[in-house]
């Protein structure tokens, strides 16, 4: 057995269902892999998933496309490579409360935003506000990453970035009403998130990428075909404070955005290129990044 580790981008949730299904059903072991799934709760998100790859703490990680771009433009470049897209369609959105009188992104001028402090995040939020006719004059807050959603619920912040198929489901069951702004509605061609990544220069990892993808894909396909059993598996790994989430609703929102069948995880290179062109055009990133340098479908 080859010992491998996967760092999650967030606490266990619906986007990770295939990994846990594969783990429980021994699909990784069938492919010669002894997998450990690393939960960010273990270190209170003190080290990001991609950083864990850089530090050789894990071999694989989940992160957004922006992280791939960031690691290819840093002074100390890491040859981070995206090898699978978990969602084929963006399910994220900016969330605000309905009583905040924020009716569109431009109304975030003079308001607050709880940021994950990712390299391009604040620039993207400013650009969203500008695209809507605002100035981009928003106050960024940097709370503990795992406490960001609480800042919205407790009215300690006016906005943040969430997944509609997780926090969006939690929000729908609260007394507070919320409003959502999707990137695509404000001229932002947002790319893939989360993305499964590894270090292209780590031969030992790349050598096992095909087997890892094969086992992971089998888990996601299994979860599509075995809803009830798969949700029971996922439920065992969800933090206690989120056990009451409506998993069926999360599942139903997610399935249309996940590739079904053998093309699970494959990238649309044109989609990523459009996002690369956009961040260059808006001067969020000045360096030119080649799409083939940051993503590949070669391990399918």
Image (spheres, rainbow, N blue to C red):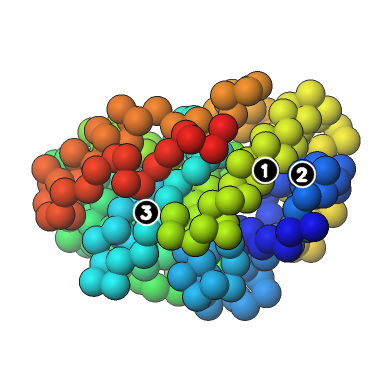
Residue at position x 54%, y 72% from top?
56
Check whether the beta carbons of the residues at disc 1 and disc 3 lie within 8 A of each other.
no
- Tell which tag, 2 or 3, sits nearer the viewer: 2
Residue hosting label 3:
68
Crowding at mark 3 (Cα within 10 Å: few <14, some 14-19, many 20+): many
From what the image shows, is residue 208 above or below residue 275? below
Q: Position of residue 117 (x, y in %)?
A: 36, 67
Q: Residue, x 68% and y 61% (percent of image)? A: 4
| 224 or 216: nearer the viewer | 216
What residue does disc 1 label?
Answer: 211
* Quarter occupied by residue 59: bottom right
Label 2 secondary element: loop
Q: CA distance from mark 1 to mark 3?
A: 22 Å
- Contact check, label 2 and label 1, Cβ < 8 Å: yes
Q: Position of residue 116 (x, y in %)?
A: 42, 65
The Cα atoms of the two marked residues, 2 and 3, are separated by 27 Å
Query: In the picture, which quadrant includes the C terminus?
Result: top right
Number of on-image labels: 3
For this rendering, which residue is in front, 31 or 158?
Answer: 31
Query: Residue 31, which numbered label?
Result: 2
Q: Secondary structure at mark 3?
A: helix
């Amino acid at each position: 057995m080859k010992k491998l580790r996967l760092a999650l981008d967030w606490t266990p949730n619906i986007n990770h269902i295939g990994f846990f299904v594969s783990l429980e059903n021994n699909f990784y072991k069938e492919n010669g892999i002894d997998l450990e799934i690393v939960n960010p709760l273990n270190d209170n998100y003190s080290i990001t998933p991609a950083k864990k790859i850089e530090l050789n703490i894990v071999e694989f990680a989940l992160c957004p496309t922006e992280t791939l771009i960031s690691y290819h433009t840093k002074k100390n470049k890491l040859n981070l490579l995206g090898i699978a897209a978990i969602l084929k369609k963006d399910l994220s959105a900016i969330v605000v409360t309905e009583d905040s009188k924020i009716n569109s992104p431009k109304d975030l001028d003079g308001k607050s935003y709880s940021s994950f402090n990712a390299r391009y995040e604040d620039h993207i939020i400013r650009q969203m506000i500008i695209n809507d006719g605002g100035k981009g004059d928003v106050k960024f807050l940097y709370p503990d990453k795992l406490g960001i959603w609480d800042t919205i619920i407790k009215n300690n912040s006016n906005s943040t970035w969430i997944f509609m198929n997780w926090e969006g489901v939690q929000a729908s069951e609260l007394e507070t009403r919320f409003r959502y702004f999707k990137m695509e509605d404000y001229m932002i061609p947002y790319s893939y998130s989360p993305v499964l990544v590894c270090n292209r220069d780590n031969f030992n990892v790349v050598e096992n990428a095909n087997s890892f993808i094969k086992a992971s894909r089998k888990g996601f396909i299994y979860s599509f075909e075995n809803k009830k059993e798969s949700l029971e598996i996922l439920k065992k790994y969800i933090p206690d404070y989120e056990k009451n989430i409506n998993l069926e609703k999360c599942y139903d929102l997610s399935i249309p955005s996940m590739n079904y069948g053998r093309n699970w995880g494959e990238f649309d290179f044109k989609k990523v290129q459009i996002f690369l062109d956009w961040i260059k055009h808006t001067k969020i990133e000045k360096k030119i990044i080649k799409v083939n340098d940051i993503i590949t479908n070669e391990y399918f």
